[in-house]
Image: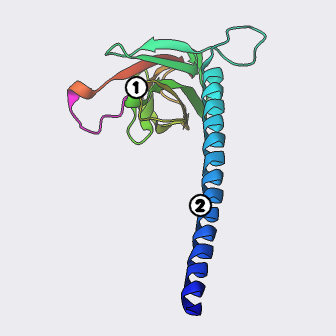
Amino acid sequence: MKTFWNIVITVVLVSAAAMGMYYVQQSTIDDLTAKNKSLTSDIKKLKADNNTQNTSDSDKQTASTTYKSEKGVTVTVATPTNSAKVTSPLTVTGSVPGSWSFEAQFSVRLIDAQGNLLADSPAKLQGDWMTDNLVPFTATLSFGQGASKNGTLVLLKDNPSGLAQNNDSVVIPVTF
């Protein structure tokens, strides 16, 4: 009979300990979930603030120029500006629809007026690329002097299918 009561007491104690651990873990999970929601909200606010264009002359940020691709897709480029004089290394920044990339990348090319490829580099998206919304990107191109004083910066939509109907691009005139 004593063994029976020992077993009952052990089962009750183990059950109580398990329930206590469950409630402590659940409380921790709830706290982490609340913190995650708060962080997600803060990140969204920062992204929204980051995407706000400010055209004030006293502001150190450069306003983005909006371009329409061959297929009418809106792309913004902060640097370089239209017809800007560029030097190596050239940092290209702006925002493209996430769908313009594959695995968060797309190509940026610098071509001189004679059609010579001076540089080709992947642009890397800085946020969630699995969206049709605009996502910030950055690319750095290193190049030598071309045969001419003028050229173009070409942003090419990544097209893993290889099908011509999925190609798209934006062309920005630059000078050297």
Q: Residue at x 66, y 17 (%)?
A: 62
**Quarter holding residue 98:** top left
The verdict on residue 158 being magenta is yes
The foreground one among 165 and 48 is: 48
Point out the stretch of residues depicted in magenta: 156-164
Q: Residue at x 66, y 31 (%)?
A: 42
Q: Where does label 2 land, which residue? A: 22
Q: Residues within 10 Å of mark 1 (few under 14, many from 20)?
A: few
For the question of whether residue 18 can be seen, the reply is yes
Lateral position of residue 121 relative to residue 69, left or right: right
The foreground one among 25 and 5 is: 5
| Alpha carbon separation for disc pair 1 and 2 | 41 Å
Measured as percent of width and height from the top left, residue 119 is found at 47, 36
- Report the residue that reaches farthest toward the right: 58
Q: Which mark is residue 132?
A: 1
Q: Which mark is residue 124?
A: none
**Quarter holding residue 58:** top right
